Image (cartoon, rainbow, N blue to C red):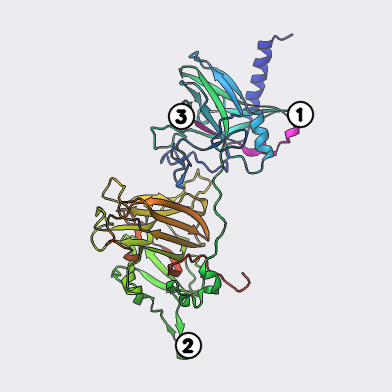
Amino acid sequence: MLNSSARKKNIFFVIMMLLLLLPFKVLSEVYWSQGTEENKDGATFIMADGSAKLLWRQKLGDWVDRNGELFGTQAFSTLDVQDVDAVRKIALDLTDLVKYWISTPDSYHGLYLKDGASKGSVFFTSSEAGHLEAPFLAIQTISGIEIFEVVKDTSLHASSHNSLGHQKRFEVGPETPTLIDFNEKFLRLNNSEIIKASLYLSTTDRQFGDVQISAFAVAPLAEPDEITHGIAWDYPHDQNLIDHPDVILAEQFNTSERLFGLVEQSDWQKSVSNMSGANTSQLVGADYNKDRFAPFDGHALQIEFNSKKSLGFTGHYLFNKLMGREPEQMYFRYYLRLGHNWRPIQGGKLPGFAGIYNKAGWGGRAIDGYNGWSARGSYFLQASSNSKFHGAVAIGNYVYHLDIRSNYGEGFSWNSPLSLLQRNRWYAIEQYLKLNDPGKDNGQLTVWVDGHRIFNKTNFRFRETTQLKIESLWLDFYHGGTAKPKSTYYLYIDNLVIASKYIGPMRKGARD
C-alpha cells in the first residue's frame, strides 16, 4: 500500500502526463496583453495593453475582490510561501475564484496575484519555460481531473515601462503583481461538478523572505457612457444643420450636379485657410471602387499618405473668419474612416483645436502660456498580434500644454475599446475643448466616439493669458514623427461640423 508521499507523487505524475497531451497554446481573449517579445508592448504597471494604448485605472493594475469590489481587500484565497531557497511545486487554491468566473458572465479577465501582507518576493517559472515547469490550472470534478494550461503570464514591475511577458519567470512581490491567463475552456465546466481548483506553480531558487500570495480577479474594462444624441439628431443626414443657431460650420464634402449632367466640385476649400501646397486630397463617392471604400453620406474627402512626404493634409478653420471672433470653448465632430491599406510606420496627427498663432505649439516649438497651445488629435500604430485588439488603431490627442517637461507635445490615449478603430469603418469623432482660466488648471478636453463619451480630462493648463483663445480647428493629417510612410494609403473624412453645443452622431433617417 502506497504511503501519502508516494500517492502525491503519482497524482503529480498523472497531472504532468495529462498536461503534455494538451494542444498547443491558443490566444486568450482577455483584454490585457502579454505583448510581443520584440516590441515588449504588452501589460506594464501603467498599461493593460501597450500596443492598444489601454491604461489601468491605477498603477500596478486593476483587480476585483471576492465581494465584487474594485480594488477590494478580500482575496479569493491566500497562500504562504516560506523562503526555503529551493525549487518546488506549490498549489494555490482557486476553487472559489473559478466558481465565481463560471457563475458570473463576462467576469473572466485573468488572475491577479499580489503579495498580501509580507515584504518579500518570490520568482516562479513562467509559461515560456515549457510544460514540465510551466504553471497550470488543475480542476478536480466528480468525473476526474482536468488540466488547463496557462496561455500567458506577466509581471507588472513598477520600474519597467517594457512588458515582461516573455521572460521565463515571473515575480510576485510588494510592488510586483502578476497576471495569469488560462485556456478559457475551463469556463464550460459546471460549478456543481467542481470539487477543487488549484493553480500549480514552480518556485525558482530566487526568493527573498516569506511571501503571502493573494488571489484576485482582474477587473473588467470600464463601461463607456450610453449614447448621447446632440443637436444633429434633429437634422437627418445633417441637412440644413447649418441653420441651427449654435452651428458655426457644417461641411458635407459633397459635389453638386449642374446642367447637362456635369459634376461641380464642392467649394469646401473656401472655408479653410493656410492650406499647404503639398496637400494630397480629392473628393470620392459611390463610383470610387478602390481601397474597399464605401461612402458614409454622399461624397467624402480622401486624404493620401505616400512615401514621398509625411504630410497628407493641413489647413485651418480660423474662427475669426468663420464667426468674427475667437472663442474659449467649442465642439467639433467629423466622421473618420481608415482605408483598407492603412499602413503607417509611426504614429501621427489628426484634427483638433489649436491656438498656435504661428508662434508655438507644434514642431518642437515649446509653449510658455503666452505664445500658443494646441490639442490636435493623434493616431498610434496598430495593436500587435498578442493583443485582443490586434490590427486596431488607437487614437487620442497630442497636446501642447503647460505641464509637460519637453519642447514637444504629450500624447494622450482615449483609453477605450471604442477608440480602437478598425479599417474600412466609419466612426463619429467629437471633441469639446474649453480653455483654462489663467492661473488655474481647469482646462477641459472631452471626447465622444459614435456618441459615447470615452474621455474627459478637466485639469489642463493651456495658457496664462486671456489673449490666447481657440484660434482654429486644425485639420492636420500627418505621418510621424520624422519617418515617411513606406507605402501609399488613405483615410477619409465626412460630415464635419463645428458648433458651440454638443453635436452628436448624424441621424441617417427620420425613423433612426
Local packing at callout 2 (Cα closer than 10 Å; few below 14, some 14-19, many 20+) is few
Judged by depth in the image, the label closer to the viewer, 3 or 1, is 3
Q: Earlier in the sequence, mark 2 or mark 3?
A: 3
How packed mark 3 is, by other alpha carbons closer than 10 Å (few <14, some 14-19, many 20 or more), is many
Instruction: Answer whether labels 2 and 3 touch (C-beta < 8 Å).
Output: no
Of residues 493 and 17, which is closer to you in this image? Answer: 493
Q: Secondary structure at mark 3?
A: loop
SS at circle 1: loop
Image coordinates for residue 138, horizontal then vertical, percent = 65, 27
Residue at the extreme bottom of the image, as rendered: 260
Residue 261, numbered circle: 2
Q: CA distance from mark 3 to mark 1?
A: 37 Å
- Magenta-highlighted residues: 174-194
Q: Which mark is residue 143?
A: 1
- Image position of 135 with respect to 61: above or below: above
Amino acid found under the numbered disc labelled 1:
Ser
> Is mark 2 in CB contact (under 8 Å) with mark 1?
no
Q: Tell me which amino acid carries mark 3.
A: Thr
* Closer to the eye: label 2 or 3: 3
Can you tell which mark lies on residue 364?
A: none
Of labels 3 and 1, earlier in sequence is 1
Q: Is residue 339 visible?
A: no
Label total for image? 3
| Residue marked by disc 3 | 176
Task: Mark yes or no: residue 341 visible.
Answer: yes
Per the model, the C-alpha gap separating discs 2 and 1 is: 76 Å
Query: Dots 3 and 1: beta carbons under 8 Å?
Result: no
The residue that appears at 41% across and 41% down in the rendered structure is 39
